[in-house]
Amino acid sequence: MISADQAGWNGRKRKVGIGSTEAACIEIAGQEPALVLVHGFSDTSRSFSLLAPHLAGRRLVIPDLRGHGASPAGTRGFAPADFAEDVAGLIERLRLERPVLVGHSLGSMVAIEAAARYPEMIGGLVLMAGTLRPQIGEDHPITIGVRALRDPISPADPFYDYWHACEAEVPADFLTMAAKEASAMPAALWRAILEQVRRVDLTDKARTLRLPALVIAGERDLLFDETHQRRLLEEIPSAAFVSAVRCGHNPHWEDPALVAAAIARYFKVRTKAGPQPTAEATGSAG
């Protein structure tokens, strides 16, 4: 496995002004089109620290979403649409030319929302462990677990055994830092984001998408399983599919080499003709 410097990760962040707020992000120089990596609920840019070394040579922009990591919570809200506005603002501020949005879990919802709102700004989508409609009910373990969190949240809270569960081995220092950073979020913010996510239905917006898209799903994802992946492929007809075998909800942690290879195959370096998606990474969710 290619190593990633977990201790030094946060020291690489810089603040970028977007509208009335700012976003903390890490930028890594490389070839275009840029990949904007959008993390999931309670994560930070660190979520992509295991993947980034496998994407060496590509330009990467990896923000902390509002209220996560070093990015302020702001005053607007915490729905995918709010996060999408921040991502669009970051793309505009950094003058990125039709980047590919790579979203994980909540980040995939944000990516769909951003592409539907600003199709002229986005060159493609990678949707990892994604869904159009989370369907997280009152009795779901996430709902019960998040509502039970109390400040100060301990990084050793048993909830993280479920929240950060992986089917394959993931470096312990990475998981330790992920739990520490998630615990820095106030319990009220956890609940606010959860309630927004539970209401999400992106079906109609997905149907408007007319851009290259790649769906990557863990074969053993218990949160957004095969049914969720089928719906993504049905509603985004342009999407190709890659199954991350023996992975759960976090394929970019569990098999970052596979995820990076799929992205590299499907979204090649830009030529004079523009981004060059291929059909090599196609398949079926069922």
Image: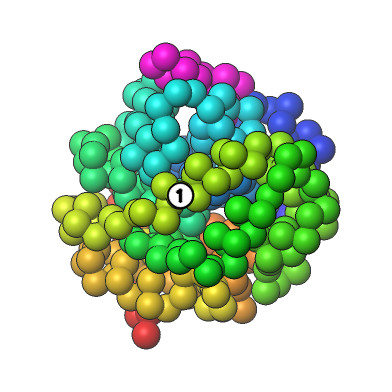
Per the rendered image, the range of residues in magenta is 14-25
Horizontal side of 20 relative to 260 (left or right) equals left
How are the residues colored? rainbow
Horizontal side of 96 relative to 55 (left or right) equals left
The answer to whether residue 256 shows anywhere in this view is: no
The answer to whether residue 259 shows anywhere in this view is: yes
Q: Residue at x 56, y 24 (%)?
A: 72
**Secondary element at tag 1:** helix
- The answer to if 179 sits in the magenta stretch is no
Q: Dot 1: few (<14), some (14–19), or many (≥20) neighbours within 10 Å?
A: some
The N terminus sits in image quarter: bottom right
Please name whichever residue, 105 or 118, is drawn nearer the observer in this view of the structure: 105
Q: Amino acid at mark 1?
A: Glu
Q: Residue 113 location in percent, x, y?
A: 31, 45
Q: Residue 208 location in percent, x, y?
A: 16, 53
Tell how many labels: 1
Q: Residue at x 23, y 66 (%)?
A: 235
Please name whichever residue, 43 or 152, is drawn nearer the observer in this view of the structure: 152
Q: Residue 282 location in percent, x, y?
A: 35, 73
The C terminus sits in image quarter: bottom left
Q: Residue at x 44, y 38 (%)?
A: 78
Q: Residue 216 location in percent, x, y?
A: 45, 66
- The answer to if 15 sits in the magenta stretch is yes
